[in-house]
Amino acid sequence: MPTHAVTNQVPPLPDYNTVDSQPALHEGLRRWASPAAYEEVCALGARAGSTQARTWAVQANTSEPVLRTHAATGERADEVEFHPAWHSLMEVAVGAGLTAEPWTRPAGSCDHVRRAAGFIAWSETEQGHLCPVSMTYAAAPALASNPALAARWVPQLASRSYDFGLRPVAAKRGAIAGMGMTEKQGGSDVRANTTQAVAAPGGPLEGGDTYRLTGHKWFCSAPMSDAFLVLAQTEAGVGCFLVPRVLDDGTRNSFALQRLKDKLGNRSNASSEVELDDTWGVRVGDEGRGIRTILDMVAATRLDCILGSASTMRAALVRAVHHARHRSAFGALLVDQPLMQNVLADLALESEAATTLGLRLAHAVDEGDTALSRLGVAVGKYWVCKRTSPMVAEALECLGGNGYVEENGLARLYREAPLNSIWEGSGNVNALDVLRAVSREPASVEAFVAEVSKASGHDPVLDGAITRVGEIIAYAAQPAAQAGARRIVEQLALTLQASLLVQFAPNEVADAFIASRLGGDHGATFGTLDAQWSQRGAKALVDRAAAAL
């Protein structure tokens, strides 16, 4: 045989629909959204799984953003240039209503679920550009504390028109928002921020009380956004401010981009360090209550961390199953071999649990159930984002050496996988936030217990876990609980996911999840489901996860 003859190589991933190929996603969309929303998101899923979209993703990550600090004539420019593929991705995301549109829709529209499903579906294409999309979605609830400012900005943030470029908001068809919280010395401890805000009445911005800000921000992603929610110290404590890149009269606000971060992943998205020097801003919320104000934004971005991580899991699973269906070893296709079936079924369980949890929490937002979303989002953000890295690593290993090269996209997913567990509060920060919610917000505890209790009576193992939730929460409210916060959150997360799968997934999915995640019938790595069960049940889980691929 000639040495150049190619055999037993996996063909490129074909075009597929990221919605109707994923049972947990399209079932949840049908359950909690309208038929029109289902059709709309399915159309987006077809674009997300296309060769064109995957090409844009590669181009946006290999031709990275470039910072231009100065114009040729010496003036400060402070602009970032992106490959056209970035703008193509953004145009689709904004055009699909993945920014702030749900906050402008009437109660009962189920638009947060529509948007959450679209976010999962489109994120399978490329994750970096969803950062500004997420921040734009999340800015709206924070701006609601200043009605005049919200009236001026939210319609633009909710627009389905992507209008790139630095111009006054009144001159744009749509706007993008970012945030600037962390600083060199403080990180997540934003009360240690040193940026100062001094009241300056009558400034060149409409919508509220104007201030001038001086300081720095260590992480400011998507610096070409039209405005940023920024934390700064006032005489009354930390305040929150809307800082536009361009003032109402068309002049540039002082917003000096020092450099772009050289990140592990998320390479398509520019993350910068910013210096503020007498920069104009409008106060959002009450003076000295900035952390409380911006937490409304953080809660929404944390939900997107769950959705984005669920999408990353799904993208990795799709590639692993595709490879196993086309690659032979030791006389059989990988997908037909019992141990590989165990691995793929285990990955499918993790993916379905993450997606179902994310959509249920979006449904809670639609219902105005802030009690459930408060604790559920904190628990889910910790756990789903934590599970993404090991899951993507296992999916990559299904491809062997082929998974470790760039062409199939898994290498990029692997670099992306840890990100959501770091952004919007790393693991410890989120675990401690769960303890705060448990000890200070009894309504959230009550809503959480009510949700998991809906699955009572299905399985003795789950019943025991539901009973222990009350004991765990009682312990979590004690000061000594901090050292065990991660184990507390893990148990709460697994019980919530198991309960949701009992309610909304086939019995074979829920039962396998309960046995492996709560019943102790699992090893320390993926692919260690019970061997006897796996021989009779693993193939059905793999088929469910990938039947439409």
Image (tube, grey):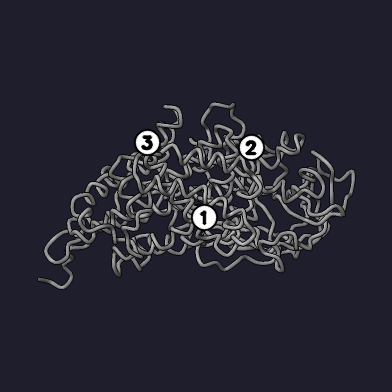
Give the residue displayed 56% in from the left and 37% down from the top: 365
Earlier along the polypeptide chain: callout 2 or callout 3? 3
Q: Is residue 334 left or right of residue 366?
A: left
- Most extreme residue toward the right, as rendered? 201
Please report contact status of discs 1 and 2: CB closer than 8 Å, yes or no: no
> How far is disc 2 from disc 3 in space, using C-alphas?
34 Å
Q: Which mark is residue 27?
A: 3
Image coordinates for residue 51, horizontal then vertical, percent: 36, 49
Badge 3 amino acid = Glu
Q: Is residue 102 above or below residue 478?
A: above
SS under mark 3 = helix
Give the residue displayed 62% in from the left and 42% down from the top: 442
Q: Nearer the viewer, mark 1 or mark 3?
A: 1
SS under mark 1 = helix
The image shows a total of numbered marks equal to: 3
Q: Which mark is residue 489?
A: 1
Q: Which residue is mark 2?
A: 173
Q: Nearer the viewer, mark 2 or mark 3?
A: 3
Badge 1 amino acid = Val
> How far is disc 1 from disc 3 in space, using C-alphas?
27 Å
Q: Which mark is residue 546?
A: none
